[in-house]
Amino acid sequence: MDVLREIWDFMSTAILRGGMYSLMAVGLALVFGVMNIANFAHGEFYMLGAYFGYFILTATNKLGLPQFVPPILCILGAGLGVAVVAGVIERTSFRALRKRSKGQWLMNTFLLTLGISVILQNGARLVWGGKYRGVTRMWKGDALNSLLNFGLPPDRLVAFLIAVLCIGGFVLFLNKTSTGRAIRAVSQDEVGASLVGVNLGFIHTLVFSLSGLLAGIAGASLLSVTPASAFMGTMPLYKSWFVLILVGMGSIGGSIVGGLILGILEAFATTYLSQFLGSGSQDFICLAVIITILLIKPNGIFGKAVKSAVE
Amino acid sequence: MLRVEKLDVAYGHLQILRQVDMHIKNGEIVAILGANGAGKTTLLKSVMGLLPPKAGKVYYRGKDVTGTPTFELARQGISFVPEERNIFQAMSVEENLLLGAYYNKDKAKIAQNLKKVYDMFPRLAERRKQLSGTMSGGERQMLAIGRGLMNEPHLIILDEPSMGLSPTNVLVVFETIKTLTSQEVTIAIVEQNVHATLNVASRAYVMEHGAVVMEGTSEELSGNDYVKRMYLGQSIETENETEA
């Protein structure tokens, strides 16, 4: 029985975490694949999502709405809020840079995202102070409580379901709508896309907003697991980059699988190795795997030699 | 339909086009001929907003469109089929064609145009699910032209449509161009295949070193000694010798 219990715990932790990593990584991969930007401010979108979610949740909790309404508003509002912030950032910084010069694009945008990250972190610190803002429990209800008997934390489970919904919806959007098709077109051939009438500027802003939307939703969904604080974005950023390096840059399908692989690696490290390696074992294992991947297969396990398109 | 006035284009300090004047009337097929490096592609790219001109104007349907972004021109009914094709390689043939009608919201119209393109190029219909990056050069060229036709353009600009194609496919391309004229599409075509081009075109321009050196109807140019010698490969040396 104990072994079964252990395997169950292991798998549930792995998958519940992995779903969130996938959600973060998909946004990062999208921006890299379409705009060729290595976004190091992606973690700050997660952070803003958590803050926005916290304020919306505490405000709507006072209104006496049905139990499940405030968390839904919280997650939707946080996602949309971050999408707007990301859109404004794209218009004011990346578009301006694109107009001036496309030389050294990857390096310049990388530096730009680092600057944006510093500004957002310290701006959040300035506005909201050093206090951690979190909630103990987001989703309440008897049905959810029974989940605890299976060792499943309800908030994490719901967050995982949200991640699955978002990723599923996002993949459908990319493949089935004409705007989604245009996004993939831009990632494959910018000139070809403008020749059929796709406004590149609009697609770039949209893509950056969408990646902000996904990160914001991730931040708000995990509010009870990681409370909002100004520098909370670093870990999810690194995790998303782990995933991208693991599977290859710019591949959406790969990022989804990669998130789950990362979840499994971490769960493995915490369950079986922390007794030998201490509490840092999960980072140790992840970094060891990343270094190995970079040495053996620098394009990632699903990567191709050529920059792959968003697929 | 299209008028180019005194267009100057440069890459950095290297001037490619000098004072190019050109016009295309409604329903015409106009050919632009010239050797490699004469500036034909540069001319098309700057008309299409892909290269900013240094000086000069481009008018489309009577309106000054100099400096208008490429996607706007596409939406106003200019289809440019570039030499590089610029198809979306990781997408299926059908998705490529649907993107050709990207800003058209009329579903029935899109389906109708899709059928038209498939009728024109049955080869594409056979391969509608295939990734376009895995197709042969000829098929890609058909796809690029088909994509350019998906939104019922007023003006279609073809850059080297027969380049890299097998003789059979070249024939298909020129047949297509002929059928297009019956559909009241205006066509500008850049070609190395001068003989076939003059056969379908109504008028032609000859470019050399970034300037238009000659213009006239196809009959005039096919009869011109200079064009015959330089582009049609007909030897008229004997006459020259007697003169000398």
Image (spheres, coloured by chain):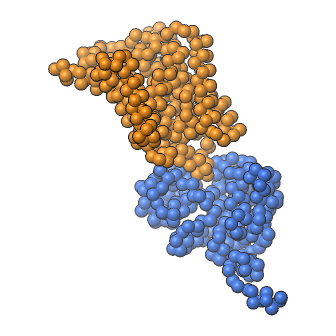
Locate the N terminus of chain B by quadrant: bottom right
Q: Colour of chain A?
A: orange
**How many numbered marks, from 0 up?**
0
Q: Nearer the viewer, residue A125 or B184?
A: A125
Q: Is residue B207 above or below residue A243?
A: below
Residue name at image x 80 percent, y 91 percent? B242
Q: Estimate the x, y position of residue A54 in percent, counting from the top left.
A: 49, 14
Q: Is residue A270 left or right of residue B63?
A: left
Q: Estimate the x, y position of residue B2 in percent, counting from the top left.
A: 73, 59
Q: Colour of chain B?
A: blue
Quarter of the image holding residue A287? top left
Residue name at image x 78 percent, y 52 percent? B13
Q: Is residue B80 above or below residue A257?
A: below
Q: Is residue A185 left or right of residue A296?
A: right
Q: Is residue A246 left or right of residue A37?
A: left
Q: Is residue A223 above or below residue B169?
A: above
Q: Estimate the x, y position of residue A257 in percent, counting from the top left.
A: 38, 36
Residue name at image x 47 percent, y 47 percent? A305
Locate the C terminus of chain B by quadrant: bottom right
Residue A187 in view in this figure = yes
Q: Estimate the x, y position of residue A1 in percent, counting from the top left.
A: 16, 20
Quarter of the image holding residue A40? top right
State the residue lying farthest toward the bottom: B242
Residue A78 in view in this figure = no
Q: Nearer the viewer, residue A195 or A48?
A: A48
Residue name at image x 66 percent, y 74 percent? B194
